[in-house]
Image (cartoon, rainbow, N blue to C red):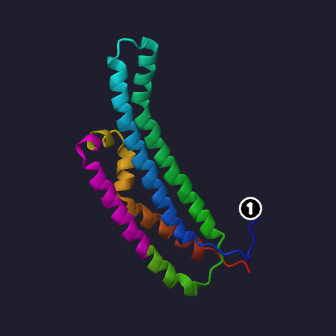
């Protein structure tokens, strides 16, 4: 990818991609772990399965939540950094700031709606106990509107806070 001063971007709209990706990653990790726990229970109860295999299933069952919680945190940090760098590379006129603030309001609203969706989804009895194993994911997705607001503000600061070198 070649960066030049003639290219424009939509860094504030990258927040939509970020919150969508975080929601999908978080929900999938919790749902997959819920299904894995059911499979692990069946594997542990089956007398025909080797003890080594049972030990491997138990090992994965114990480590999966911390791995995926770390993966969600890493995804938040990396996508946030990429959005800020992309915002820094955009040369935008300050007159467009009003549009960015309007879009930021829409992004925060969408983040709040997706956060409510996540809370409703995790209120299911089967998923609620599984979601307790993912404290970082649950916090990030439960407060997605604040995460989107923080990302949006940092991107705005990157777009308009840099010095004009031209």
User: Most extreme residue toward the front, as rendered?
Assistant: 48
Q: Residue at x 30, y 60 (%)?
A: 116
Q: Which of the 4 image quarters holds residue 63?
A: top left
The spot of residue 79 in percent (x, y) is 55, 56
Q: Position of residue 24 (x, y in %)?
A: 44, 52
Residue 126 is covered by the magenta coloring: yes
Residue at the spot 32% in from the left edge and 58% down from the top edge: 117
Query: Where does residue 150 sit, x and y in percent of width and height?
Result: 45, 65
Q: The residue tagged with tag 1: helix, strand or loop?
A: loop
| Residue 8 is at least partly visible in this image | yes
Left or right, residue 101 beside residue 159: left
Total residue callouts? 1
Residue 9, image x and y in percent? 63, 72
Magenta stretch, main secondary structure class: helix
Neighbor class of circle 1 (other Cα within 10 Å; few <14, some 14-19, many 20+) is: few
Q: Residue reaching furthest left?
A: 125
Residue at coordinates 49% horizontally, 55% vertically from top-left? 21
Residue 161 visible in the snapshot: no
Where is 93 relative to 122, above or below? below
Whether residue 111 appears in magenta in the rendering, the answer is yes
Front residue of this view, candidates 155 and 102: 102
Quadrant in the picture for the C terminus: bottom right
Q: Nearer the viewer, residue 16 or 148?
A: 16
Left/right of residue 105 with respect to residue 161 in the rendered view: left
**Residue under pointer 1:** 1
**Above or below, comparing residue 106 to residue 139 in the picture:** below
Outermost residue to the bottom:
95
Q: Which region of the structure is painted magenta?
A: 105-127
Rendered image quadrant of residue 53: top left
Residue at 74% from the left image edge and 61% from the top image edge: 1
């Amino acid at each position: 990818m070649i960066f030049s001063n003639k290219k424009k971007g939509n860094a504030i709209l990258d927040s939509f991609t970020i919150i969508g990706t975080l929601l999908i990653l978080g929900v999938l990790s919790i749902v997959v772990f819920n299904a894995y726990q059911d499979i692990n229970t069946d594997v542990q109860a089956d007398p025909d399965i080797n003890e080594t295999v049972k030990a491997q299933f138990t090992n994965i069952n114990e480590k999966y939540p911390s791995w995926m919680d770390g993966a969600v945190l890493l995804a938040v940090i990396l996508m946030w950094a990429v959005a800020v760098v992309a915002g820094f590379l955009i040369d935008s006129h300050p007159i467009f700031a009003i549009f960015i603030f309007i879009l930021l309001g829409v992004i925060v609203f969408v983040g709040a709606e997706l956060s409510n969706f996540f809370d409703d989804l995790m209120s299911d009895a089967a998923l609620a106990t599984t979601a307790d194993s993912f404290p970082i994911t649950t916090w990030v997705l439960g407060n997605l509107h604040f995460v989107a607001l923080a990302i949006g503000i940092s991107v705005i600061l990157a777009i308009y806070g840099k010095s004009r070198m031209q």
